[in-house]
Image: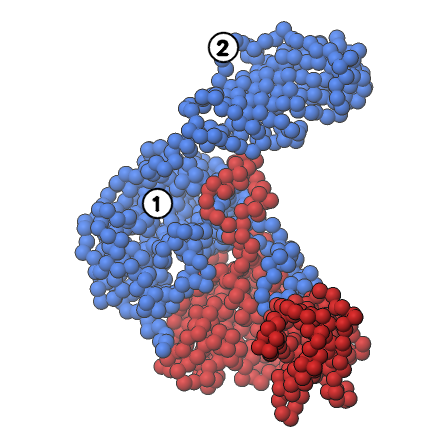
Chain colours: A red, B blue
Amino acid sequence: MRENHLLFKSIRIKYRWRDTVPMMRFDLRARFTLSSDVSKLTKEFTQFIATTNETILKKEPEKLAVIEQFSIAKDSLALTIISEGNLRPHNALLQIKNALTKELGKSHHIGVRGITIETYTISFDLDREPLKDVTIPFAEVRIQGKHVTLLLTDVSEDFLRRNYIDRMINRVKEKVEQQYYEGKAEFWKLIWKSEEKQSAWTKDPTEEMEKLGWLKQGPTKGKWFYRPQAAIILKTMEKIAIEEILKPLGFQEVIESHIKPFDIWLKTGHMEGMPYEFYYIVEPKTRDAKDWERFIDLTKITKEVDVQELQKNLSPPAAGIVYAQCPMIYWSFKGKTIAEKSLPVLVYDATAISARYESGGRHGIERVDEFHRIEPVYIGTREQLLSLREKLLERYKHVFNDLFDLEWRMAWVTPWYLQQAGKIAEEDTQDTGTMDFEAYMPYRGAREESEWLEFQNLSILGDKYITAFNIKAQKSELWSGCSGIGLERWTTAFLAQKGLDPKHWPEGFKKYLKELPQGIEFL
Amino acid sequence: MRENHLLFKSIRIKYRWRDTVPMMRFDLRARFTLSSDVSKLTKEFTQFIATTNETILKKEPEKLAVIEQFSIAKDSLALTIISEGNLRPHNALLQIKNALTKELGKSHHIGVRGITIETYTISFDLDREPLKDVTIPFAEVRIQGKHVTLLLTDVSEDFLRRNYIDRMINRVKEKVEQQYYEGKAEFWKLIWKSEEKQSAWTKDPTEEMEKLGWLKQGPTKGKWFYRPQAAIILKTMEKIAIEEILKPLGFQEVIESHIKPFDIWLKTGHMEGMPYEFYYIVEPKTRDAKDWERFIDLTKITKEVDVQELQKNLSPPAAGIVYAQCPMIYWSFKGKTIAEKSLPVLVYDATAISARYESGGRHGIERVDEFHRIEPVYIGTREQLLSLREKLLERYKHVFNDLFDLEWRMAWVTPWYLQQAGKIAEEDTQDTGTMDFEAYMPYRGAREESEWLEFQNLSILGDKYITAFNIKAQKSELWSGCSGIGLERWTTAFLAQKGLDPKHWPEGFKKYLKELPQGIEFL
């Protein structure tokens, strides 16, 4: 309904916003559509607006927001609500709607039919000037110097209820900050390093294993088929991780699904962090063979897959293959209260297979789209986890020094959950944070100049996931952490330094694997 | 180009087909478009057709096909080719095109510009009358009694080259045969059964484990999260299968990808057999964060997944999660010649996770969408495999009788590869074929009336996959087979009979697992 200008009455109210330049300013122009003509109720509306400004929009001594102007037309009430952010005008608007409904219904039997948002303008200042343009959905972004204006048009009441506004503001700020961090080296600080070790060779173990027929590439990109000689090395790594690290520390095995629904990734931030790295899962719409008859006919006749016909029979994606195992372990504790005597909770999954779409960066078995990983997860008090970290480090050192005789180092790095959410780390407090374990890869060149391989990490994450999944303990405040053990990474780190001949392997490793199976011979 | 009737010259040729009713009849009416007016070349064309009928379409003493009629219009030559199947008219047509191109080019500098198929009619007889209508792609199907006529219109030269015609005929025959088998009980013949055993209880183990918190459903349909007490039982099953069956027989472990491309499923017949049971995989179109900016913005702002926006960034499906492990093991031998001394090849995968879209049929951990399976595959001579089957049966009996003390039986059933291709088995020769291992499930009711659980199978498949993947041996003729060991199935079969209390478990099993871990306690 368009405003009737003959009946238009606009009242500028005495309330005015303070004159200092605000950090943020919200300017919402909205209109209520009413069930009857209210053009004669100027006095009542003036009173209603005055009261609203003193009640809903004020919490003594502070003004939360202000209706700066209003106008009544035939059957509508238009408002301009201004705020510096203490109360978002869109939240105020929804409260005003309730109050208005009550007031008009009681005294005049008039109903509030709907809300139309004319414009919603949000201005705020950035810490620093953007280096380039920023866009976000749902608003036009105008930036002058450090000053941002978001212009929202075409906004529904439903949209306002969804509480997107603050996330839109944050997204603009975050994008500007990211512009400054782009291309910057990630945070990296050495904690410890082993002695230099004499390498058995300087070849790329994947290439050599392929030549020997121990490994076969495929059948899809970034995947490998491990023939017996390579398979047994990977499985030995699994055994060593379990026997030498996890069991001695009292970790218990769990088995999780390797199919992760979006709602878990939404909680952990993965969904927004690396959606371009997921392998997505799509289920059939139905299992009824009748609905698949044409697809089956086409496949039998053409011996090809008609992708268009196939897609008609598939549901939209709602899940993907595990990216890291810990989110589902947290999910398994969702909403639970853990008995004090079960703390610290020490569990690991060694079953779910992980997949990451690597695109151009694939190399050998060390950077692949599909890999096998053990992920221990620990939940306990801060003290329990800090003490556990020491014990874990001791066990890891035992394996990498005594069993593998590796040349390796540890460094503080950007915590993986920040990396994974596409964010940048500050220097760490070292209570929480992530350590990377890196191995020298002789085939890549001199130890000082070449890139070392991250073959392991260890994180304490504070209460981030504890809060996200609403996990509680009987009494204690909980923290959590995890440590990704990449079996392919352990394997290449070890083989890159020690070679493929078991004769030259360190004694500690040979206790687990002293000779390789015969494999299958081809002509 | 429409025919010019003024110039139309139709010649009925002396060659006629024999008068007996043929089993099959192909009638192809096609027209060549030529680069110049050929209406004056009647004599030359008559000669050309006569020669063609005596050369291309004849292999003494047999007529393979016949050009029964031809006509020349301004710049086109129309033909009617008839055959009883010895040479498919569409294949003949492509040969005639070559001959015509050569002939006209040489003598008259006229080129053949293209082929238009006017109609292509194929008639053949079925073994029995269809019970209901049959449709297939690319043709109208008319059936009278046992007589089928396929009418193809709108057919391109490219279509003819693709060789779909015979598969279309087969598809009609197959669909009619399937009508007779629909709803019929599958083939099942008892081979052996154990004594009756006293069950420890009659409860559904999944339900009880859920109550105890050993298992948690989800996070997506037909998946489970195994807490420590349940996880250790499943992992013990894996260990027993490897230690008691596979290692003693000399099987070597391999590790395959759990992502199976369509081309492997096309070779094995899975793609046409059970496309409605796959979990499909969809990869990102690109890993470039720029292309994902809008999706990431939307996710950060709405905290929901915008599926439409997501789908814009995804490639069409080209793979799915492993359904059974053996196809990829065969793929790993594709095109290889195996050294005689490596026979029989004995390998197994225990790593790839399987997924099957079960829809309504899900129950407990025994009928799930995601499961863990060991699949031994064996490739060798017929004698080697028949002898291996005996040894495998002996080891399986040892485990199910001596370690698990199970009540179970073995039966010959429809070979799984026929089942999976949606086909029906004949009674088996028992050289090749599939045995199912079934366990009595006390919670389902009386042993005579209730459905037993298939917890294991064993197949010898002849040369089916050997041929499909072109696998050769130095000298021997090869056969292959496989045996699916379902860990969830072993677990439920065992627990359904023996209960959850380790005190009541058989001694043989207790050698592998005599007590359960503490797990995690919740309030």
Chain letter belonging to callout 1: B
Q: Earlier in the sequence, mark 1 or mark 2?
A: 2
Amino acid carrying mark 2 in the image? Thr
Q: A320 left or right of B179?
A: right
Circle 1 or circle 2, nearest the eye:
2
Residue at position x 42%, y 29% from top? B131
Looking at the image, residue A502 sits to the left or right of residue B294; the answer is left
Is there CB contact under 8 Å for labels 1 and 2?
A: no
Residue on which disc 1 sits: B458
What secondary structure is found at the residue carrying circle 2? loop
Judge the density around disc 2: few (<14), some (14-19), many (≥20) Cα neighbours within 10 Å: few
User: In the image, what residue occupies the spot 62% across and 80% down?
Assistant: A189
Number of the label disc, if any, that sits on residue B20: 2
How far is mark 1 from mark 2, CA to CA?
A: 49 Å
Taking the spot 55% from the left edge, 22% from the top edge, the residue there is B122
Query: B411 or A250, which is in the foreground?
Result: B411
> Residue A267 appears at what percent x and percent y?
54, 70
Residue type at tag 1? Leu
Q: Is residue A18 above or below residue A70?
A: below
Task: Give residue A207's position: percent from left, percent from top.
Answer: 58, 56
Q: Quadrant of residue B416?
A: top left
- Same-subunit check for callouts 1 and 2: yes
| Residue B472 in the image: above or below residue A520 | above
Between B236 and A171, the one nearer to me in the picture: A171
Q: Residues within 10 Å of mark 1 (few under 14, many from 20)?
A: many
State the residue in front, A138 or A343.
Answer: A138
Which quarter shows the N terminus of chain A? bottom right
SS under mark 1? strand
Quarter of the view holding residue A125: bottom right
